[in-house]
Amino acid sequence: MAGTADTDGTASGDGTSPPRPGDGTSPPRQGDGARDRDGEGRARNARPRDGLGRPLPYGAPGVDRQPEGVVRTPQESVTEAQALLDEGKPFHAHEVFEDAWKSGPQRERTLWRGLAQLAVGLTHAARGNATGGARLLRRGAGAVEEWAADTGEGRPHGMDLGSLAVWARELAAEVEAGGGPVDARERAPRLR
């Protein structure tokens, strides 16, 4: 998917995340208006990121990003995403779901996109963005429920989609009610 608006209003190539650097990203901008580029010349933000995917200043220590474009089995995707959620890294988990969305069978695209939206919703809630977090949690819940209704599968790859949708809507209501950022590790869902 090319050039859609990101789920938080920023531009991205896939609708769920900002560009992420690949191997061979260019050096930091030098203040001349040049953009960071990867080895193939595509615009890629080379700034390091924190555990919730927020950009840090160039040169600051950051958390390694998930490698882009990894093809995993559905079981591997669920297992890796759960480990990242358990570590309080929902932004990184969403990248795993994105890879599954892009590389998996067409019939599962809505499922994986919905899971990516749930992870991004948790990311925004942990960052203190109540509006964006609640919106994405509800959108993801709707997507996984739609997929389950369309396919008749409520437990694909061992995941309990009904429980995930309930978790997402409860968390959306909580973050909208106030109380500040949530702890991503403590509020991470159980996928299975």
Image (cartoon, rainbow, N blue to C red):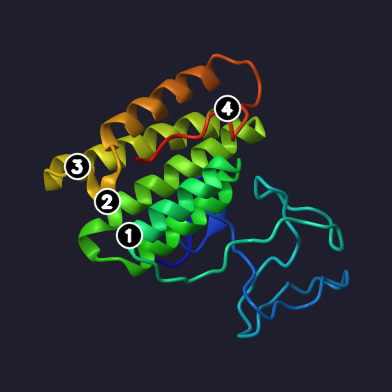
Q: Mark 2 and 1 residues: CB-CB less than 8 Å, in contact?
A: yes
Circle nearer the N terminus (1, 3): 1
Circle nearer the N terminus (2, 1): 1
Picture quadrant of residue 40: bottom right
Residue 43: x %, y % from top left: 64, 73
Q: Mark 2 and 4 residues: CB-CB less than 8 Å, in contact?
A: no
* 150 left or right, relative to 7: left
Secondary structure under the numbered disc 1 in the rendered image: helix
* Residue at mark 3: 148
Q: Is residue 134 above or below residue 18?
A: above
* Residue at mark 1: 74
Secondary structure under the numbered disc 2 in the rendered image: helix
Quarter of the figure that contains the N terminus: bottom left
- The amino acid marked with disc number 4 is Ala
Residue 127: x %, y % from top left: 65, 35
* 28 left or right, relative to 43: right
Question: What's the CA distance linking mark 1 and mark 3?
Answer: 16 Å
* Residue at mark 4: 130
Task: Give the class, few, some or many, for how many residues have Cα within 10 Å of label 1's Cα (few <14, many ≥20).
Answer: some
Question: What's the CA distance linking mark 2 and mark 4?
Answer: 30 Å
Single out the mark in the foreground, 2 or 4: 2
Residue at image position (45%, 34%) is: 189
Residue at image position (65%, 45%) is: 52
Q: Is residue 2 above or below residue 111?
A: below
